[in-house]
Amino acid sequence: MTGLHFTGMLQLYLDTVNRTVAEPLLRTGLFAGVTTNPSLLRRAGLSWAELPAFHSWAVGHGARDVFFQAVGGSAEDLARSGRELAAIGPRVVVKVPATRAGVEAAASLVRDGVPVLLTAVYHPAQALVAAAVGARYLAPYVGRMSDNGRPGVEGVAAMVRVLRGTGARAEILAASLRGVEDVVALAEAGVTAFALPPQVAEALLADPLTEQAAADFEEAARELRSTTSKGADS
């Protein structure tokens, strides 16, 4: 029950369950997979029973990892839910909240060989918890940290230092990102994995100066082809 994992490599994920939006972005080959949570599923009207079909769709469109979140009011319920999700396919990474019950469930899942992401992380101390429990990833909510008066980028940079200082193998998957500026700042701090909402993913692929340069190149190429064609006719 292990998803593909590429330690030390930049990994970009799409934080969406909207297939219409995700499909053309996955087609670029830029994104390693998709991340989901119950709020996204509810917003899209996607039921729990449809998760296997969504997993198959995502993998069929190039996703190397698909993140599903376990649910339940107790550690036992969360662990049971996580095992059910992991059974969907080998590309599944199970997300559990960084609560006391979630940490206990994460430990149980890790012992079973299930790849785990500890989610809803808000404080650098929780990076220690994720590392100690054997989580593969931890997901700090950067934008929400800032919304609640905590320094988002600075807080995640502290998590990077904590993990480096302990030599832990847990990897930060930055989430709740509001713009490409956050992504760049976090990359400068050493973060190598990002869960991007579609609008941020699109922004990575479009810069007006780049678009203009490409248009200029195409115009020059058309003129060259026209000149070559006239030369051949003469």
Image (tube, helix red, strand yellow):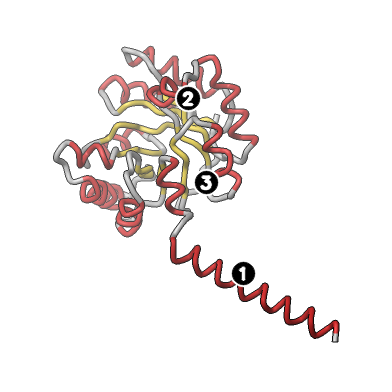
The residue under label 2 is 112
Q: Is 28 in front, or is 115?
A: 28
- In the picture, the disc for residue 218 is 1
Quarter assignment of residue 37: top left
Mark nearer the viewer, 2 or 1: 1
Q: Can residue 125 be seen in this view?
A: no
Compared with 126, 80 (above or below) is above
Q: Is 2 in front, or is 43?
A: 43
Q: What residue type is labelled 3?
A: Phe
Left/right placement of residue 191 relative to residue 52 reads left
Q: Where is residue 204 in the image (x, y as percent from the top left)?
A: 44, 53
The residue under label 3 is 31
Mark nearer the viewer, 2 or 3: 3
Quarter assignment of residue 145: top left
Query: Could you say whether the residue bearing mark 1 is in a helix, strand or loop?
Result: helix
Residue at horizontal 43 percent and vertical 36 percent from the top: 15
